[in-house]
Amino acid sequence: MLEIRNLVKRFGPFTAVDDVSFKVGKGEVLGFLGPNGAGKSTTMKMIAGFIAPTSGSVQVLGDDVAEAPLKTKAAIGYLPEGAPTYPDMTPLSFLNFVADARGLSGAERKRGIDAVVEHVNIGHVLNQSIDTLSKGYKRRVGLAQAILHDPPVLILDEPTDGLDPNQKHEVRELIRRMAAGKAIVISTHILEEVEAICTRAIIIAQGKILAEGQPADGGWRIGDHFAEPGRLDAVFRTITGGPAKEAA
Amino acid sequence: MSGTSAVFKREFQGYFSTPVAYVFICIFLFCTGIFTFYVGNFFVRGQADLKAFFSFHPWLYLFLIPAISMRLWAEERKSGTIELLMSLPVSLAGVVLGKFLAAWIFAGVALACTFPMWITVAYLGDPDHGIIIAGYVGSFLMAGGYLAIGSCISAVTKNQVIAFVLSVVVCFLFTVSGAPMVLDFFSAWAPQVLVEAIASFSFLRHFNAIVEGVIDLRDVVFFASLIALWLFANAIVIEMKKAG
Ligand SMILES: Nc1ncnc2c1ncn2[C@@H]1O[C@H](COP(=O)(O)OP(=O)(O)OP(=O)(O)O)[C@@H](O)[C@H]1O
Ligand SMILES: [Mg+2]
């Protein structure tokens, strides 16, 4: 459903994303991992059609993001890094705005809004200015916006950052529930989250894909490494910068 | 289309959900009042028209319109909501237009709030209503011109103060390019064609032409194409700057 081919993004002389390719199919939840500054958010921005790649292509449901941006944007739900929202709006007016902009109307719109309000549990703050919400609630509103139109492709940049443990759990459950009919990409620094919800993971650093992995034999197999349950972080460290094996 | 109207609605309501709209309209009314009645010697002139009232609009807009336009894009870029906005299935042109129209209609609302002036002259004398209507049309068009400039400049920077100052400067250039002082300066040495060209860009010249009571198509076309041009530049600037 989502296919990325040889994606490159340069900012001046600096290469933020360097020849990244991957595919995400229906029912998959891809965990996008990597140290700070690895190029995760930049890749996601290109998928969402916010910034144009220097070279390479992104296809969403067979449409190219560069050629049919409105079509691909309609098919994507995107939570940008930091979950930006309009502080002077209320969650309800904000969701109404997004529904308008996405062309939802009538019963579909009401159903969509009711459903996401329930999913991310913001019913009791719907009419409070977003400005005055706590960080976690702001993020929930951002998440609500991304799933409002029940998109086939979901791109979530650190969806659980700043949430309390209960809400983290809720959001993971939500993602797991939605996964069946969708292609989902989430970036995260929480490796237990990868074990909890991802069906596959990619580790990138300095813009390049270093390793790919999936659950196997009761743990995770990433590249040449095997991680026992709960030990993904050790493998992550080895791959992204621990003992510099390749340097030798 | 639904995207443009969604953006328009959000922006327009935004003015009224904060004190911005009320403060702006109050200041606008206060200034037009002061200028018309005191500086413009409305009563002393003893004429039943709104010439004095309209003649100050370019100078008021010079400061008040950049105050509306400065946040249009600068804020969106600073807070990162531009990323959210651009991930919605709405074309860039649609967003630029929606934002601009919201600001323009808002300026129109502020302008419409000056109707007591009209009632006053109608009560005191027997004004030519056609000329007054022309004045309002001209003023509204001119506000659109200033707004389009301000909107484009607001996309250049994340800093609203810088956006404000730059907009005032550029709007000032577009205003005074027709003032006698400026033209005298140029006509001393520049060829007549150039002087003519500079003067033809002046808001003052086109606005004054309309305020005289003749809505000449050329003046309307001037403002319309100026708005289109600046909004086009606006879209290009966003395309270039949005990532940073
Ligand atoms: N607009 C930009 N101009 C210049 N450099 C940029 C720009 N955006 C991102 N970068 C650089 O690209 C690199 C990748 O950034 P990116 O935000 O994609 O990292 P990330 O993997 O999401 O990191 P994090 O885990 O901290 O969120 C960084 O070095 C960053 O400084
Ligand atoms: Mg990031």
Image (cartoon, rainbow, N blue to C red):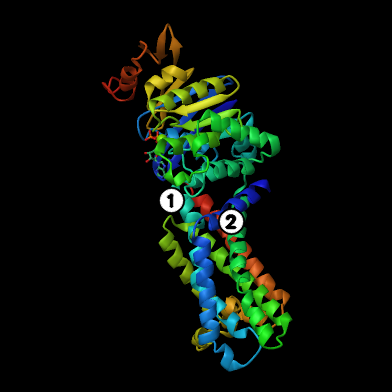
Q: Residues within 10 Å of mark 2 (few under 14, many from 20)?
A: many
Taking depth in this image into account, of A240 and A126 the one nearest to the observer is A126
Q: Amino acid at mark 2?
A: Phe
B195 or B182: nearer the viewer:
B182
Judged from the image, the secondary structure of the residue bearing numbered disc 2 is: helix
Residue A116 in view = yes
* Left or right, B9 with reference to A15: right
Q: Quadrant of ligand 2?
A: top left
Give the image location of residue A66, x and y in percent.
Answer: 59, 39
* Residue at the image point whose x is 37% and y is 11% from the top: A229
* Labelled disc at residue A34: none
Which amino acid type is marked by label 1? Lys
Which callout, 2 or 1, points to the residue nearer the camera? Answer: 2
The residue tagged 2 is: B12
Position of residue B152 measured from the top left corner of the image (x, y, whole percent): 53, 60
User: Residue drawn 54% across and 79% down?
Assistant: B33
Label 2, label 1: how far apart the Cα atoms are = 20 Å
In the image, A170: left or right of A109? left
Residue labelled 1 has its Cβ within 8 Å of some atom of ligand 1: no
Which residue is denoted by mark 1 in the rendering? B78
Disc 1 secondary structure class? helix
Q: Nearer the viewer, residue B174 or A218?
A: A218
Dot 2 falls on which chain? B
Label 1: chain letter? B
